[in-house]
Image (cartoon, grey):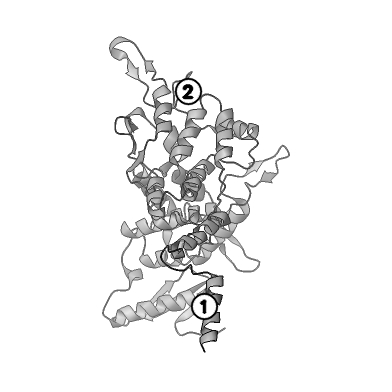
Amino acid sequence: MAKYRGVYKRGGVWWYRYPDHLGKMIRKSSFSVRQSDAVDARAKAVAAIREGKEPEETKKIATYTFNDLAEKYSAWIEGRQASSEVKGYIINRLKERLILLSGETGNPIYVKLGPLPLRRFNTYLIEQLQSDLKKKGLSKPKTDKNGKIIEAGPLQDSSSNRILNTLKHMFTKAVEWEMVEETILKKIRKVKLPKEVGRLRYLSAKEAQALVSVCDDHLKPIVITALHTGMRKGEILGLKWDNLDLEHGFILLDKTKNGERREIPINKTLREVFNKLPRRFTGEGEDRQLIPYVFHNVRTLNFYGNVKRSFKTAAKTAGLTDLHFHDLRHTYASLAMMSGKIDIATLSKLLGHKNLKMTMKYAHLAPTHLTKAAHVMDEVYDLSTSTKLTQSAHLETKKELAYVS
């Protein structure tokens, strides 16, 4: 192993030392098991001293734990992000997580993330968390009848990435809130997320019609709304009458997943569905109030928290395997794209994607549609006033040139 000046190992992690502007020796931990991290940190500190600046790690920032950050971040996302409930669950599970802190052979050290100071987070720790999530998942382990611990099971790359992206954003805010130095954020950002292979299961128009035909009465208008708008399940189940502008033909969503307002046009089919839905009231006289939710349970008068069971039954009855409710959103986008009548930018806006990159997975759905696009060139070159640009015409031209020569 190469030796570097001012870098040494102590307690399983690498430290570095350097003289400050007064010549006093400063010793700092890199909180990393990698020598290169300590070398980089020392180089930055020395460079800052030479430029007459104060190294970031010597700035006086109080010591905060992950629990402190979790509490502040949870309060910050409440009411600000549509995914606050999901993120809240992720954060609470991370607080209780035990992670391998040291990679020393024969001397493993496990720590709970909650009480851990933010300065102790580093690339190695986050990589360990990433591996752990893929093996054991995020849910709290359960025990069987014999008391044996049963782990939740491995997570797919998309789910693991979602958790780590939440963690990375927490540390981004921690730097903004001066709860930790930016050097810690850089270490966390070093962790590479695997490229996701997104699920793209969608129905044909015939399969979609078959699904609608077997849905229960309460589920049918919900599924039709999904197939004709591409809205997310949470957006549909939380839809209120105030969100519907039937006069001008729009669904107005103020609170979406990406936090931006979205307007979705209502077609003829949807208009008929909404007009047929009953509007129920509670109370009598002056206390009479309209139930705000478009889709609600007729017994409890509350909106449907989930339709997983009834949707699964309908899919099975229709003979559709491996179908999730979110696949109805894929179906809307896929069939719209394959129709050739909606461009990718418009589709992206209708789906409420933050950028066009998210919509590009629908741009090349089936070889038959690519072939159809290729045949367009036949029409382009089929000029009524001149010879077609075909192989036979090309050969005839060659023969004429040969005869002349």
- In the displayed orientation, state which residue is furthest to the bottom: 405
- Nearest the eye: 324 or 168: 324
Q: Is residue 139 above or below residue 55?
A: above
Q: From the viewer's perspective, tell me whether residue 352 is left or right of residue 311.
A: left
Residue 231 seen in the figure: no
- Quadrant in the picture for residue 253: top left
- Number of marks in the rendered image: 2
Q: Quadrant of residue 206?
A: top right
Which residue is the site of mark 1?
397
Secondary element at image label 2: loop
Q: Residues within 10 Å of mark 1 (few under 14, many from 20)?
A: few
Is the N terminus in the top left, top right, bottom left or bottom right quadrant?
A: bottom right
Q: Residues within 10 Å of mark 2 (few under 14, many from 20)?
A: few
Residue 224, above or below 362: above
Tell me the residue that label 2 is attached to.
297
Amino acid type assigned to the residue bearing label 1 in the image: Thr
Q: Position of residue 72 (x, y in %)?
A: 36, 48
